[in-house]
Amino acid sequence: MELYGLSSIKIFPSINKLDCPVEILLPIVHCEANFYLPIEVGDHLAIELFPERVDQAGFQVKTKFMRDNITVGIGIIFHKSINAKTRKGCQLPHDISLWLEASSLKRGITPV
């Protein structure tokens, strides 16, 4: 995410470290994974992330797990954007939308 100019604290805020209250939350609403080969503790895995907008309030991150350039598993995590106070759906934050757009174009946002 930092590659695209988005601080991880924007997606994974720690309540104890925030200077301001969180307005929008991005809870996981669904996940799934398929593993094609066994993996073991200590295996060195390469991970590729493929974020994608699902709609105005949600996105998914597909994750490919590889060992020695062989795909050993694929996972998908779905997030929905909700208002922290009302817990109702809302539009994705602007920074997240920029990250998703930049990721879909296969080029990053130039850091300032």
Image (cartoon, helix red, strand yellow):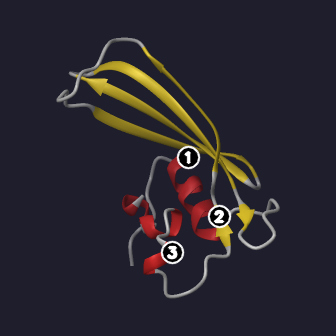
Q: Amino acid at mark 3?
A: Ile
Q: Nearer the viewer, mark 3 or mark 2?
A: 3
Please, what secondary structure does the residue beneath circle 3 have?
Answer: helix
The residues bearing labels 2 and 1 have C-alpha atoms spaced at a distance of: 22 Å
> Residue 107, percent across and down?
44, 53
Q: Dividing the picture into quarters, in which one does residue 36 lie? A: top left
Label 1, on which residue? 104
> Residue 24, percent across and down?
67, 69
Q: Nearer the viewer, mark 2 or mark 1?
A: 2
- Location of the N terminus by quadrant is bottom left
Label 3, on which residue? 15
The residues bearing labels 1 and 3 have C-alpha atoms spaced at a distance of: 30 Å
Sort mark 3 into few (<14), some (14-19) or many (20+) by Cα contacts within 10 Å.
few
Mark 3 or mark 2: which comes first in sequence? 3
Please, what secondary structure does the residue beneath circle 1 have?
Answer: helix
Label 2, on which residue? 25
> Residue 93, percent across and down?
66, 68
At 31% across and 25% down in the image, what residue appears? 66
Q: Amino acid at mark 2?
A: Leu
> Residue 62, percent across and down?
52, 35
Q: How many circles with numbers are drawn on the protein?
A: 3
Which dot marks residue 81? none
Q: Is residue 37 above or below residue 75?
A: above
